[in-house]
Amino acid sequence: MPVYSEQILQRARRLGAATLHEAAGRIGALPSGIKPVEKAMVLCGPAFTVHCPALSNLQIHHALYHARPGDILVVHVSGGTEAGYWGDILNEAALARGLGGLVIDGGVRDTAGLSKMDFPVFSNGVCIRGTGKDYEAVAWLNEGVRMGEVVIRAGDLIMGDRDGVVAIPAERVEDVVIAGEAREADETRKIQLIRQGARTIDLYGFVNGAPAAITPGAPFRGRG
């Protein structure tokens, strides 16, 4: 069960993936190839993790009926990226269950329809190759999965938008949201100053110790 409130969830959604990633100490960024099938799609909710065998989506079907409304299905496909694990049938089923979205490190298909439906789908690509139903394979539901350098556990906060997807450990969500809001406020202030003529190198202190002029033919370093 997530240890953060619905209010915190809504505040996280307003911040976006990049801000949460930075506020958490630059952790949790899933592989950059995972993007929404339609740019305006946004998802934010607790992870329900699925570790399925390559080229089988049987476990995803079962996950739909174990996940709770609002959960984000986070599906690891064991390296079998060249397949379409998700399409219009599963999308309709997820909508009927009230789930919050899908993040998968494999492919999806039927994207003409998926892009128009009110269910956010983030995938590693689009692939028409079909999947089978591997009844004998070892698989896990709601256990940790790894995507890129990130281990995602059940209940971790998943936030996705057009920039990408971030996973924040459940026990850190509230602190990260507070830090993210402070970061947003600081960036708003800096933008106002830039519009008034301030320089980024002054605002961030980059000018201290930096060369005051360019020396032809010499490398430029941030500190003299």
Image (cartoon, rainbow, N blue to C red):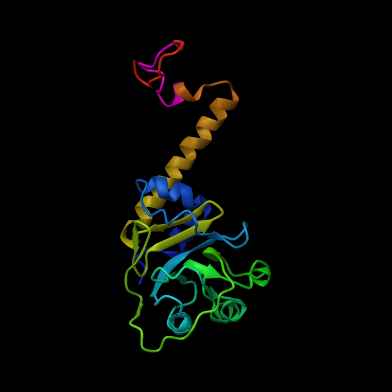
Classify 45 as above or below 140.
Answer: above
Judging depth in this view, the residue of 129 and 174 nearest the camera is 129
Residue depicted at 34% across the width and 15% down the height: 224
Extent of the magenta region = 202-213
The image shows residue 183 at horizontal and vertical percentages of 44, 41
Whether 204 is among the magenta residues is: yes
Residue 150, located in which quarter of the rendered image? bottom left
Which quadrant: the N terminus?
Answer: bottom left
Classify 153 as above or below 141.
Answer: above
Q: Is residue 102 at least partly visible in the picture? A: no
Residue depicted at 45% across the width and 84% down the height: 62
The image shows residue 94 at horizontal and vertical percentages of 55, 78
The secondary structure making up most of the magenta span is loop
Judging depth in this view, the residue of 182 and 136 nearest the camera is 136
The image shows residue 7 at horizontal and vertical percentages of 46, 61
Q: How many numbered circles does the render carry?
A: 0
Judging depth in this view, the residue of 54 and 57 nearest the camera is 54
Residue depicted at 38% across the width and 54% down the height: 28
